[in-house]
Image: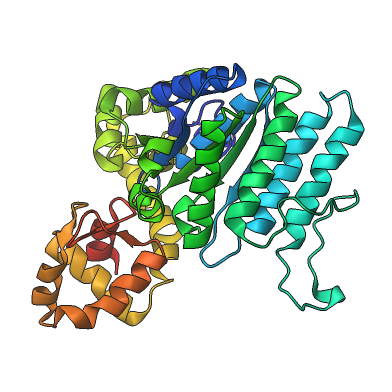
Amino acid sequence: MDPVRNPFAPGAGQRPPELAGRDREIDAFEIVLERVARGRPERSLVLTGLRGVGKTVMLGELRSMAVRAGWGSGKIEARPDADLRRPLAAALHRAIRDLAVQHPRQERVDEVLGVLKAFALRASPDGARLRERWQPGIDVPVKNGRADSGDIEIDLVELFTEVAELASEVATGIAILIDEMQDLRPDDVSALCAACHELSQSRMPLVVVGAGLPHLPAVLSASKSYSERLFKYARIDKLDRKDADFALIAPAEREDAQFAEDALEQLYERSGGYPYFVQAYGKASWDAAPTNPIRGEDVALAAPEAEAELAVGFFGSRFERATPAEREYLRAMAEVAEGGDEPVVTSSLAHHLGRKPSSLSPARDSLLKKGLVFSAQRGQIAFTVPHFGRYLLTST
């Protein structure tokens, strides 16, 4: 097979494996866009799932849908212990520019940009020198008195209201997409929930689409008890056999190639149906196959190459972030789960290591913050990365 035309190389496919089997989520967002644009009440959306299931790719597709519908949109990636104002201001600046081409009055657009600039400038700490103050790059005069109190909850409600009103003036909406949403600071999560609640009550055309790890709903619920009523939650999981096969067959057919049935069986068994792994094994198999169709023996020959790439780029890059104490904790999880992806009871980890449970709490808390594990439920812990336990038992 020609590796130059490998349809499984990143960015090569017209419809990457991460979007195979996601028609339900795409259709649901289409309904959200239509209902909000018509002034009907609709909840914002939260996507949750393990790493490697395609949440980030899904966010990109949903943003593209919003743009095609004429909405203003902006996307950010939350980072631990980072302030929300700067990235959110940049995202909303982009969204307002999308609306500006539709709005008949530039002075009205500049007015909202002035409010956004006032909001953004509050990101600089009080007392900071002029040269140390962050400049948001919004080339309009500041409009003080709205979204600039310094209280993120008050400011976010006022800012979202201003931007949503601008969108309603051109009969469209605003979509704010937030990746790694579980990494938002508690104050920012609370403010975001409050703003979504306020706008949903007034039926303003603004929706937030968040994506994060499986414990994200618990993060939102801990911030505001009413958060479960604010969002539609969609669990993004591994693909079933039919959709995993489609993710392989469709790109190959565009290149006049096929997969034999035994190849598809092996690819599903090795990938577990996780889109990132489907793409990794599909790419390696394509490169290894000398003839068409791709057969089971080609997959077997290519598997070590795919696993080596995953070991470095997917598993290893995350394992390297862990301290020695955290690595001990991770290995214990893998050993207790016997290399599986199932949650393990935290007390069983202490027993396995011959340690007091309290002595493991620092490592556990640090791994939670780094996004390497999540609390499946009280007293249980699980990997955020599928097949991570198997990797730890065989490669470290």
Residue 82 location, x and y as percent?
58, 65
Which residue is depicted at the point 42% across and 66% down?
Answer: 370
At 21% from the left and 83% from the top, the residue drawn is 359
What residue is at 61 percent from the left and 29 percent from the top?
204
Q: Quadrant of residue 176?
A: top right
Indicate whether 302 appears above or below 248.
Answer: below
Task: Tally the numbered discs.
Answer: 0
Estimate the x, y position of residue 160 in percent, counting from the top left. 65, 41
In what quadrant of the picture does the C terminus appear? bottom left
Given residues 278 and 284, the one toward you in this image is 278
Nearer to me, 274 or 80? 80
Residue at 35% x, 65% y is 368
- Specify whether 330 is left or right of 350: right
Q: Looking at the image, can residue 257 be seen? A: no
Instruction: Name the one closer to the observer, 208 or 58.
Output: 208
Residue 352 drawn above or below residue 123: below
Q: How is the image coloured?
A: rainbow
Indicate left or right for 330 with 356 as reference: right
Percent across and percent down for residue 357 are 16, 78
For the question of whether residue 266 can be seen, the reply is yes
Residue 238 image-quadrant placement? top left
User: Image quadrant of residue 294?
Assistant: top left
Camera-side residue of 256 and 29: 29
Left or right side of 113 for 294: left
The percent position of residue 182, horizontal first and vertical second, equals 44, 54
